[in-house]
Amino acid sequence: VGGSQKESMSLKNKFDIKDDSNLFFVPHQSQSDLLDYYNKANILILPMSGKHKHTKFYASPNKLFEYMASGKPIIASNLPSITEILTDNETALLFDPDDSVHLISKINQLINDDVLSEKLSTNSKMLSKQYTWNTKASNLIKLFNSKIK
């Protein structure tokens, strides 16, 4: 889910995805519609590139926190910006950025291991409670108060 209609069609054509396939490329959706897609998904994937310094070290995408709160198993790029939050084989499966073969192996691993899938789902959902807007605001207030004294 994401990108333009043109990009979605291009991917569908590139990979010869038929209308009766269980693989979909869906263009950008409104925030309110994303929950339906999260609920329909078996696995949520966050394939961030490691080619850019900002993404590699500093990105903290809201999508990651939405994925965690969804209660679905997550597969994400193994980047410092992601491992600051997620732990491989505990809260997500991590794959080498920009390596589609490694990503496919992680997808297959998760598809074939219901116990691991449930463990990742439970752990990431529990972890997500540390990253709510209320928790973040509370932590910032505590930080500010500690510096004012």
Image (cartoon, grey):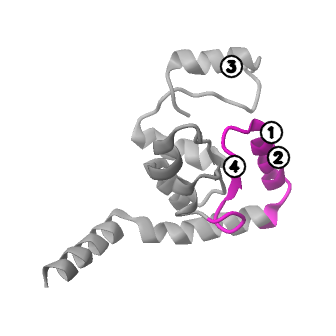
Residue 116 percent across, percent down from the top left: 77, 65
- What residue is shown with label 3? 12
- What residue is shown with label 4? 42
Q: Earlier in the sequence, mark 3 or mark 1?
A: 3
Is 36 placed left or right of 62 in the picture?
A: right
**Marks 2 and 1: CB-CB under 8 Å?**
yes
Q: Is residue 115 above or below residue 51?
A: below
Q: Secondary structure at mark 1?
A: helix
- The stretch drawn in magenta includes residue 105: yes
Is 124 placed left or right of 43 in the picture?
A: left
Region in magenta? 87-115
Real-space Cα separation, disc 2 to disc 1, in angstroms: 6 Å
In the image, 50 versus 93, the foreground residue is 50
Q: Is residue 7 above or below residue 117?
A: above
In the image, 86 versus 22, the foreground residue is 86
Q: Quadrant of residue 16?
A: top right
Question: In the displayed image of the protein, which residue is found farthest to the left?
Answer: 148
- Image depth: mark 3 or mark 2 in front: 2
- The stretch drawn in magenta includes residue 23: no
- What residue is shown with label 2? 105
Q: Which mark is residue 101?
A: 1
